[in-house]
Amino acid sequence: MLKKNLGGVIAALLVVGVPGQAFAEKKMMETNIGDFSANVSLYSDYIYRGISQTFEEPSIQGGADWSHDSGFYAGAWASNVDFNDGDQAHIEIDVYAGYGGSIGNFGYDIGILQYLYPGASSSLSYDFWEVTPSISYDFGVASVGASISYTPDNFGGSDEAFFYQATIEAPLPKGFTISANIGRWNIEDNATFALPDYTTWGVGLNYGLGSLNSKLEAFSIGVDYTDTNIDRSVCGSDNCDGRAVFNISASF
């Protein structure tokens, strides 16, 4: 089925717990050319904008990131996938770059991300790119964000698409964080999978253990519930149904 922001893939998406969303931006080393970090996660399912990318099977994900004090950043991320497409695609690789910063409690970001599916036939037109401007504001008790992702040629040979998303995240006592998101994907001429424009939403609870030693900068566990308004008869499988997803993540 459809592919993965979330997660969190790109920091600009501001998706808390998806997939995505799924980066933990921690410094591994500091040099005069910027900061480098790496992350690895295990998910009970890979959900992208409300839809399973692994046919409801677990996924292992990981990435590496570079960021600079100037606000520029770049990185790469990968996950196993299963679209039930006759073994055409087994892995997704995302390569991204962007620029972000803050003015007081106000944050801004613009990033571009290329989705790649090595091994899949070019006739499937799986590979595509997106650009995502986003903003956020930290009220102290909670932070909110909004983003718009645009692509001229969406996944699977469908035409241009916009994904609108709003997020909220609030810290809780004892290292817990609660979050929620809602998004709307408008897709022109989605002939490949015949999915309509749809809405997706989710809530999540995360527990961060913080730095465990000099090399492991952060370790966290979490659970997210995601759903869409796509009818199962239209989706053609359970991939669009609501579900709880568990994850374990570490950054270095």
Image: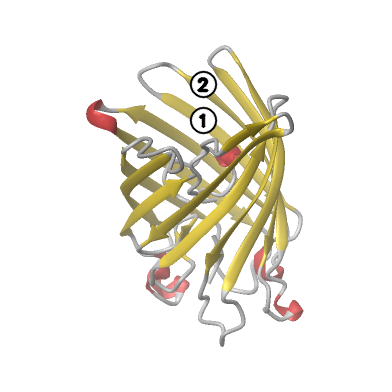
Tell me the amino acid under the disc marked 1: Gly
At horizontal 35% and vertical 39% (from top left) the residue drawn is: 212
* Quarter-of-image position of residue 179: top left
Q: Is residue 240 left or right of residue 194?
A: left
Mark 2 Cα within 10 Å, few/some/many (few <14, many 20+)?
Answer: some
Residue 235 location (% of width, % of height): 46, 71
Q: Are marks 1 and 2 in contact (CB under 8 Å)?
A: yes
At horizontal 52% and vertical 56% (from top left) the residue drawn is: 62
Residue 147 location (% of width, % of height): 59, 37
Q: Which mark is residue 145?
A: 1
Q: Which mark is residue 137?
A: 2
Tell me the amino acid under the disc marked 2: Tyr
For the question of whether residue 7 can be seen, the reply is no
First-in-chain label (1 vs 2): 2
Q: CA distance from mark 1 to mark 2?
A: 6 Å
Above or below — where is 85 with respect to 58?
Answer: below
